[in-house]
Image (tube, helix red, strand yellow):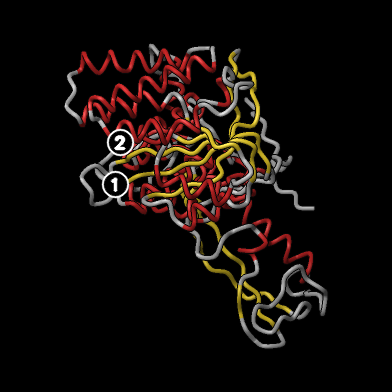
Amino acid sequence: MLNKNYEILCKLNLTQNNITVNDVIRAVNYELKNVAVQIIGRTIDNIQDGILDRFLGIRWNELVNKIVPWICPHCHERSSFVRRGRRPRKLKTSEGIIEFSLYQVTCKSCRKTFSPFPQLLGLKPRTRISTEFEEKIVKLALGNSYDKTSKYIEEFTATTISHTASRNITLRVSDNVSINHDISEFDSILIDGTKVKSGTKERGSEIHLALAPVKSIDKYGRKYNEKKILAFSIGKVDKKFKSQLSKYSCDNVIVDGDSSYSNLIKDLFSEATHRRCIWHIPRQVSHLLYMYKVPVKDREVFLSALIGILKNKDFYKAINEYFDFIQMFERLQFYDIVGFLKNAMSGIFHDKEDWNNNKKHSSNSLIEREMREINRRTDIGCRWSDEGVYKIVKLLEVNRHAMHNLDLYFKQNRRPIINLLQVSLCSK
């Protein structure tokens, strides 16, 4: 058991007049900003000293051939080691730069010198930033530009970091987290896409997202739908997106009508009911009307009629009105709209029994909110590369709907706070 006492000398000067609460707060923070890093550095040194004393014996009275909690990386010896000095190390944390030493040992078998403490102390190889600091950087970067993240770090912590380092840390974490889930069967899977300003194309790149609503939960007095992210890709619907989705099964698939999803859902979800989101139908027709250069006022008349059809509670009457709506565009020779409405029909009018079940016919409120969040983050800063936007959006969705994967990456930060230190303030 390691017991150490640290004495902190604090001199309080109250000779000035008109001292306010804010004066005290700023003065204490300014004068004591280095205390935390000094205590952390000395504690790390003392922990290593205690481990070496326990397993190798105290200096000049060392133990022989005692099994130690580390292995020689060169010859895999477990019992024959001697002390061999130490080398300085710096670690950037949210409390500031921690300066400590890494104690070294020499293996008697192969005569190699190394430090066993990076592994014992939970330090990643060649890391210069602590995981608790990395997590704070990532959390800030998910909602702010990398430049603003660095400014917030400087303002609210005792250290600084460049916007380039913030970006590199965030993208590295994204590379090392997955979007996997233990659940494999869902009632419904929603697939949709959005444009983000990335890549070389003027209108940007397409992002494809697959989500599954799980349950409704009460949060802050309001109902929220808990969701799981199942697949994510940028650009074309590729093999990776298909491979991610192939792990899951469902009863219903709701899409927005993107033609690239047709073959995908037929191959992966042949037993599921394929539905079209009725919220997207009028908006896609509006775009087609715009392409035919139909005036805004006339567009509104067409769309109002279509929305009325889709909201009609009489299943068979809605179908008849939908046919009349298609024939109207045939007479106008708007054949792209005719083809669109005919292709969408099987996904809209599936079954009389669930015609009025909006949850099975619309993905709007569930997935459009994700699209708004994606667009909000990717609209920050200059134009993205496809790789950069893929990684930040992946991490954003993991943080929102696959948090267990982020917890697994930052598992050191999830350990319960142990009763390591006891600090008390004594005044004289």
Does 105 sit left or right of 281 as displayed? right
Residue 33: tell me if it is visible: yes
Residue that mark 1 sits on: 198
Q: Secondary structure at mark 1?
A: loop
Indicate the position of residue 191 as horizontal and vertical percent values: 49, 39
Q: Residue furthest bottom?
A: 110
Quick one: 275 or 196, which is closer to the camera? 275
- The image shows residue 225, relative to residue 190, as above or below, that is above
Marks 2 and 1, Cα distance to the nearest angstrom? Answer: 10 Å
Q: Classify 10 Å Cα crowding around label 2: few (below 14), some (14-19), many (20 and above).
A: some
- The image shows residue 373, relative to residue 59, as above or below, that is above
Indicate the position of residue 254 as horizontal and vertical percent values: 52, 34
Q: Quadrant of the C terminus?
A: top right
Indicate the position of residue 49 as horizontal and vertical percent values: 69, 62
Looking at the image, which residue is at 57% across and 20% down? Answer: 355
Does 398 sit left or right of 331 as displayed? right
Q: Classify 10 Å Cα crowding around label 1: few (below 14), some (14-19), many (20 and above).
A: many
Looking at the image, which residue is at 62% across and 44% down? Answer: 407
Q: Secondary structure at mark 2?
A: loop
- The circle on residue 379 is 2
Indicate the position of residue 371 as horizontal and vertical percent values: 41, 33
Quick one: 25 or 371, which is closer to the camera? 371
